[in-house]
Image (cartoon, rainbow, N blue to C red):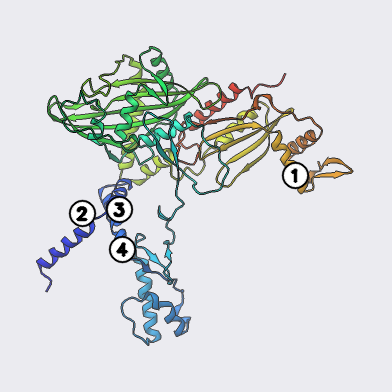
């Protein structure tokens, strides 16, 4: 008899199975935080993720549309591995057809998170369902040590495992800075609506021992790569970053920060940071919430990266306050060198709020009085609130839209490409495109010509690198392709390029003319590109696919490209 005691025992057994002390709840937590929608949607996803860990693989078979046409022996061989219930040793054909119907209904009703295997025991992927994270090609880890004050951090690049040509980021350059900052501050982790808990003891350990009078326990430091609060506080207080002095006591810092904020592209926002701690002076509990936002910036002269950390707090005694104490709020601006490289030239910082000498890791921060900063930063704050609300909305289209425009998932169907902007800029200054190609793994390349010179321009969407090199060698390689196609012939030691209509239709008049001029010695190396030029396109998601997703991305990339080409003299026409 099934009574109340048996039912409750069953419920308690279910609880131990789903959330017992020895259960790994990480997949459930991740599913809850990453699922868009209301509480029901998030809770359901978490439960499904937990149940999927314990679910036993089921045999799935392909069922014919007309099983009655099969012979009895073939029908039994078909259904036997996936029998539903009991099937006697010598079934009739009618019993086998009944099994087909039961198996079909069972397979149609099974949710996608139930693991399945084929009749040979090999794992299967549900039809129409994307492979799970474990089955997809994993991202490629790339250790970065550019910000030595924070320690090493490992970023994840897409397209791992592909044997592809790659334009690597300059060691210690601003491309590595941007990638590292995204990871340190959690912007690469999850959507803005997600909450990340900050380690209170780890953040207290940053305070010098002689100041931390209230804690008799030894400090419990945590690497910056493991805690967003630790990383942010080191960015807010370190006297140097990347080995460069942080400028924060000069009036120049305001001008640089204001100029950068006036030229930012798309802001991308971190998950919500939550820090529960207490004020030793008032013996009052504190809940601090904060966000980080990162954007690329570029004007007609310079470019770089901006970090903005902001938030508020609730104190049990004082109530709500508009600062994230005991965390700092600040603006950090890294500026790229104007010499056409990725070298970080200067680092400026303005600390907007400081938790005070008893909590600040360096005994207090320089104050500021620049009203323009509030007006320039307000759009980032309000946009962050909207980004957070989009992820929490019960209507999934808002979270999907944010992820498509600002995240690292599948991008818009029709997005501008960086190399298109580069070639169009060069075209406005007389450079004509001869060829374009794409390598497996996404590397894009184009060959252009102006007068007696050629340029090979390439873009690697995985590392966001643009490269410009002299194109004469690339043009020489096209001669082999022309020869293989019969367009370039050699008669008695004389090279001849076919310029018939048929050849022009296949290869283009510009390329055939360039090949003829190369053979005649009328193509020379471009002096400005005796050394290849390579820089990072800032302001794009460093873990996405390198396309121009956000609404401000095209204009930001245009500024960077034009500045690069002007700085290197590539746009200057020959006299």
In space, the residues marked 2 and 1 are separated at their CA atoms by: 67 Å
Residue 21 bears which disc, if any?
2
- Per the image, label 4 sits on a secondary structure element best described as loop
Residue 477 sits in quarter: top right
Q: Earlier in the sequence, mark 1 or mark 3?
A: 3
| CB-based contact (under 8 Å), mark 2 and mark 3 | no
Which of the two discs, 2 and 1, sits closer to the camera? 2
Q: Is residue 333 visible?
A: yes
- Is 282 situated left or right of 323 in this image? left
Which residue is at a point 32% across and 65% down the rendered structure image? 56
Observer-side mark, 4 or 3, equals 4
Q: Answer whether labels 1 and 4 touch (C-beta < 8 Å).
A: no
Q: Are marks 4 and 3 in contact (CB under 8 Å)?
A: no
Q: Residues within 10 Å of mark 3 (few under 14, many from 20)?
A: many
Q: Residues within 10 Å of mark 4 (few under 14, many from 20)?
A: some
Q: Which residue is mark 1?
A: 480
Query: Where residue 178 sits: x, y (%)?
Result: 44, 32
Q: Nearer the viewer, residue 575 or 388?
A: 575
Which residue is under mark 4?
55
> As rendered, which of 427 and 81 lies closer to the eye?
81
| Residue with the mark numbered 3 | 45
Q: Secondary structure at mark 3?
A: helix
Task: Where is residue 536? Give x, y as percent.
Answer: 51, 31
Marker count (numbered): 4
Could you tell me how far apart the alpha carbons at marks 1 and 3 are, in whole angstroms?
Answer: 56 Å
Between marks 2 and 3 in the image, the one whose residue lies nearer the viewer: 2
Sooner in the amino-acid sequence: mark 1 or mark 4: 4
**Upstream in the sequence, badge 4 or badge 2?**
2
């Amino acid at each position: 008899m099934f009574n109340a005691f048996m039912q409750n025992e069953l419920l308690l057994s279910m609880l131990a199975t789903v959330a017992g002390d020895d259960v790994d709840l990480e997949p459930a937590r991740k599913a809850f935080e990453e699922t868009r929608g209301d509480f029901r949607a998030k809770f359901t996803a978490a439960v499904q993720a937990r149940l999927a860990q314990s679910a036993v693989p089921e045999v799935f078979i392909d069922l014919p549309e007309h099983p009655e046409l099969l012979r009895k022996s073939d029908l039994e061989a078909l259904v036997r591995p996936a029998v539903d219930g009991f099937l006697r040793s010598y079934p009739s054909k009618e019993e086998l057809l009944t099994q087909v119907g039961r198996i079909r209904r069972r397979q149609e009703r099974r949710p996608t998170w139930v693991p399945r295997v084929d009749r040979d025991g090999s794992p299967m992927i549900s039809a129409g369902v994307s492979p799970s994270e474990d089955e997809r090609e994993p991202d490629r880890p790339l250790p970065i040590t550019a910000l030595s004050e924070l320690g090493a951090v490992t970023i994840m690049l897409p397209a791992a495992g592909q044997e592809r040509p790659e334009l690597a980021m300059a060691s210690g350059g601003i491309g590595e800075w941007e990638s590292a900052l995204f990871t340190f501050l959690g912007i690469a982790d999850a959507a803005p609506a997600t909450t990340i808990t900050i380690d209170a003891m780890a953040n207290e350990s940053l305070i010098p021992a002689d100041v931390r009078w209230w804690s008799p326990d030894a400090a419990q430091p945590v690497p910056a790569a493991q805690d967003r609060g630790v990383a942010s506080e080191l960015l807010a207080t370190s006297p140097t970053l990347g080995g460069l002095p942080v400028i924060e006591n000069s009036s120049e810092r305001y001008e640089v920060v204001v100029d950068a904020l006036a030229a930012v592209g798309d802001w991308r926002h971190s998950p919500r940071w939550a820090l529960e701690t207490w004020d030793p002076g008032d013996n009052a509990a504190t809940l601090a919430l904060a966000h980080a936002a990162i954007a690329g910036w570029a004007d007609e002269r310079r470019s770089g990266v901006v970090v903005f950390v902001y938030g508020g707090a609730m104190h049990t005694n004082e109530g709500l306050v508009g600062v994230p104490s005991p965390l700092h709020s600040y603006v950090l601006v890294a500026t790229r060198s104007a010499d056409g490289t990725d070298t970080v030239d200067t680092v400026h910082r303005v600390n907007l709020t400081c938790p005070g000498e008893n909590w600040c890791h360096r005994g207090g921060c320089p104050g500021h009085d620049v009203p323009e900063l509030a007006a320039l930063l307000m759009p980032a704050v309000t946009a962050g609130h909207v980004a957070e609300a989009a992820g929490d909305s019960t209507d999934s289209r808002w979270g999907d839209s944010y992820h498509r425009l600002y995240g690292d998932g599948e991008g818009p169907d029709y997005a501008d490409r960086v190399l298109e902007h580069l070639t169009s800029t060069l075209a406005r200054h007389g450079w004509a495109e001869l060829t374009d190609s794409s390598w497996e793994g996404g590397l894009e390349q184009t060959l252009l010509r102006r007068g007696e010179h050629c340029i090979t321009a390439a873009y690697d969407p995985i590392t966001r690198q643009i490269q410009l090199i002299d194109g004469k060698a690339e043009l020489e390689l096209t001669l082999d392709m022309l020869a293989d196609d019969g367009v370039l012939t050699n008669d008695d030691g004389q090279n001849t390029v076919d310029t018939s209509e048929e050849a022009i239709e296949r290869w283009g008049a510009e390329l055939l003319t360039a090949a003829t001029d190369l053979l005649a010695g009328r193509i020379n190396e471009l002096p400005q590109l005796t050394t290849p030029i390579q820089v990072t396109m800032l302001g794009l998601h460093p873990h996405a696919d390198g396309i121009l997703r956000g609404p401000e991305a095209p204009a930001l990339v245009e500024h960077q490209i034009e500045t690069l080409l002007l700085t290197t003299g590539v746009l200057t026409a020959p006299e």
